[in-house]
Structure formats: structure tokens, C-alpha cells
Image (tube, grey):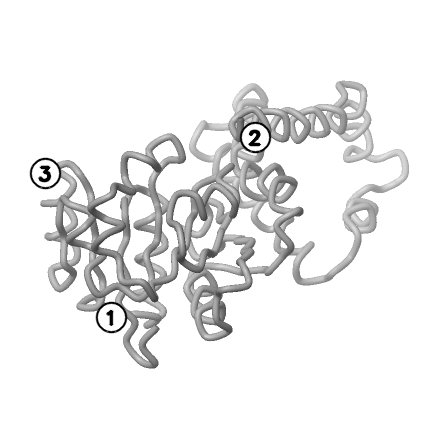
Amino acid sequence: MGEINPKIAFIGCGAMGEAILKGMLLGNVASESDIALSVPSQKSQDRLRASYPKAAVCGKNEEAVQGADLVILAVKPQMAHKAVTAEMLETLPKEAAILSIMGSFDLAKLHALVPAHAVIRAMPNTPLAVGMGMTALTADDAVTEDMKAFAGTIFNSCGETIWVDESAMEAITAISGCGPGYFFVVMDALADAGVMAGLPRALAIKLAAATMAGSGMMGLKTGLHPAQLRDQVTSPGGTTIAGIKALENHGVRGAFYDAVDAVLKQSAALKK
């Protein structure tokens, strides 16, 4: 990796890839002129050229990785073998590191996909699009400390990061990787309940979203156990405890246990 201006190639640049790109540029982690973006469709290429005029936008992955220090694999896992072609591997600089955001694609599969390259695996989540992402990172022993630091800087530009052993990645996927999906369901349900109670739809959604965001921030800022924070808003014989009792009666805790268990089972099936 270059000391000052590493060359970075994105293979794929969908919603998650572009969110990472925007975070990097806004955080001055990289300059637009040091970025190459490879996407297959002409429509996507045209849009990216208009949005990032100084970046190199192309339709062939082998063109994007020329001279790259870091290659970010931002395609869906099922597209991995189509994206990483023999032509791309021939063009890929030997010293280039690979950073993958492909879920259920572990380090062993990444090594088989891009042999002889240092590999970093990342599990970001969609809130990184608004600078509130939570990203878990793991790497093989061949990744240099400089590259690990740079990878951390990339994701710190759009949220928080944590380095973990790979053995934790599947559980992390089930909690923070998939978690936004769970919370959007809860947000939608709470907003629907607000509409049923007589609130306008837009107001109900805003109240639900702001309340969820604020509650999460309280957990992060105070460091208190969720039960302690719950107790602060739960008066004896009051309204909140009545609502919590209803949630418990409907098995809200068990539903989250089952959701995480379902993710783990699906992830194991996708690995086969």
C-alpha cells in the first residue's frame, strides 16, 4: 500500500459499496482520483461518472484493479465467481490486499477466490450510509498492520469498527449485520400502532424512528445495561410497564432469539 495515496478499486458499487465510498471521500480517507469503480451496466457507469467525475469508472474488473493497492469486493456473494475472473487475477498486482464485504464468504473461501493475496473480511451494516454504521473486521496473518489500520480508517469514516476473531463473524452478522432489518420491522409496526391510535402516518414514522435512534444512542453514551435504561422509563403501575407486559406476552424476546437462530442456520446453509 502506498504511504499517502493508496489506489483503491471497487468491484461492484451498489448501495453498500457507494455508502463506503461516500464515507471515504467525506472523511478524506482517499481522494476521488485514486478510486476505480467497476460496474457492469452502462446505466450504473454513467451515473457513477456523473457523481464521481475524477474517479475511473469502467465495466471490466481487470481494468479497475490495475495498479491497485486495495481491492474492495462489494458484490453479492453469489456473484463472486463471476466477478473475480481469471483475467482480473492476472491483472491484479501481487501485493494488492483484498477487502470483502460479502456476507457468508469466510476467509477460507476468499483465499480460494483470490489465491496468494492478503485478505480482510468486513461485515458492515446499512446505517453506514448515514455515518452510523457498525462494522466488524477480521483478517488473515498476511495483512500488514498498515493495511489493517487503513481498513479500519475506511469504516471509521462512516461509523464504528471492531476487530474480531473470525469465529465471531457469523453471530455478529446475525446481530448487527441483519439487525437493521429487524429494527425496521419494529419501527414499521410501532408506526402502524401510532396510526391506529390516531396519529398521521408521517408523524408516527418520525416518532418511531427518532425514538429508536435516541434509545440506541442512550445505550451507547451511558454504557448502562438495557435493563437499567428500561427501568428508568418504567414507573411502578405505570403505562410503560403495561406496554412491556404486552410485548412479553407476545414473546418479543423469543422472536429475537428465533431471528438470530434463523440467520445462523441460513448462513451455514449458504456456506455449503
Q: Quadrant of the N terminus?
A: bottom left
Viewer-nearest of labels 3 and 2? 2
Query: How many numbered circles are shown?
Result: 3
Measured as percent of width and height from the top left, residue 265 is found at 63, 25
Taking the image as shown, residue 208 lies to the left or right of residue 147, namely right
Asked which quadrant contains residue 69, the reply is bottom left
Q: CA gap, disc 1 to disc 3?
A: 24 Å
Q: Say which of 266 and 250 sits in front.
A: 266
Kind of element beneath mark 2: helix
39 w.r.t. 97: above or below = above
Kind of residue at disc 1: Ser
Judge whether 212 appears above or below 91 on screen: above
Name the residue rendered at 52%, 40% in the picture. Answer: 209
Identity of the residue drawn at 19% across and 54% down? 64
Mark 3 to mark 2 CA distance (whole Å): 32 Å
Query: Mark 3 highlights which residue?
Result: 42
Crowding near pointer 3: few (<14 within 10 Å), some, many (20+)? few
* Residue behind mark 2: 267
Earlier in the chain: of badge 1 and badge 3, it is 1
Q: Position of residue 237 (x, y in %)?
A: 89, 34
Residue at 65% over, 40% down: 171
Residue 230, position as x, y percentages in the image: 78, 45
- Which amino acid, mark 3? Gln
**In the rendered image, which residue does mark 1 sit on?**
31
Does the CB distance between marks 2 and 1 fall below 8 Å? no
Query: Which is more N-terminal, label 2 or label 3?
Result: 3
2 or 1: mark nearer the eye: 2
The residue furthest bottom is 3
* Residue 211 in the image, given as x and y percentages of width and height: 59, 44
Which element carries disc 1, helix, strand or loop? loop
- In the rendered image, the vertical position of residue 204 relative to residue 145, given as above or below: above
Identified at 40% across, 35% down, the residue is 77
